[in-house]
Image (cartoon, grey):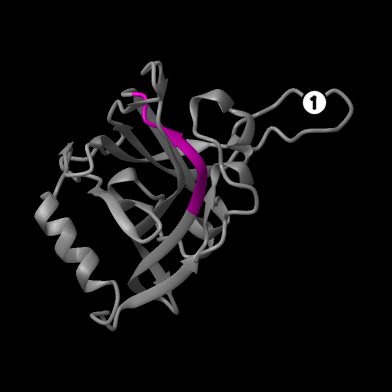
Amino acid sequence: MDRTSSKAGRNSSGFTVEKVRTKLRQTPRYQIQNYPTSGASQRWLEISVDYLVPAIKTGTNGKKYRWLDDVTMEVSVLFPAIVNNRQVMARATGAVDFWSVQMDGKRHYGIMLLQPQILARYGLTRAYKEEDFIAMISLYRGRKLIFKAYSSHRKYSSEKIMQIFKKYSGRLKSANYLELGDVILSRDKTPWAFVQYDKYDMIKPESNTRR
């Protein structure tokens, strides 16, 4: 079962966030003719967002849509982890730049992924479940916030999730805290690079670095 955002809604930018999800997914498999492949498959954490953009037409005839250049998506995920036989809250982050997003009034999609090695390295004594993760996704143009949205949770309200992120972010960090840094990967750096390729906005080359 995936976890979807309950913070959906239109904001001042005209964007409407529909869903923010965290989902554990098996590694995609490709048919390769000239190289041996393993049957083993590991679980990645996929963090995704579905959002509607406003329809903004441009040009003298009004037949073209405006494009919004240099859009950045930032992702932050919190989950329980084990360090030195002690359970802590771990925070992983990542960012990706989109070359341009068309203001076509349609639904757009974004995903980023946390590698299975991270989950294995700091994993609990039991297998992770999707409710172990909460996510925050922010979309910016430059440093102007377009929207911020949170994944929902079986136990926590959206307001509670916001409080948890405040507790484990910035200067208000708890003692039982592990900062993993920018280990969440953009789609083009993962096996999902060629999965539903035309579904997503174009990623700016060499963009998987924090500004």
Kindly identify which residue carries mark 1: 32
Density class for disc 1 (Cα within 10 Å; few <14, some 14-19, many ≥20) is few
Is 9 situated left or right of 145 in this image?
left
Image position, residue 6 (x, y; %): 16, 40
Q: Is residue 156 visible?
A: no
Is 15 situated left or right of 58 in this image?
left
Q: Which SS class for mark 1?
A: loop
Quarter of the image for residue 36 reads top right
Image point (40%, 58%), residue name: 142
Image point (36%, 58%), residue name: 76
Magenta highlight range: 96-104
Image position, residue 145 (x, y; %): 29, 55
Image point (31%, 28%), residue name: 56
Total label count?
Answer: 1
Image point (25%, 45%), residue name: 151
Image position, residue 117 (x, y; %): 57, 56
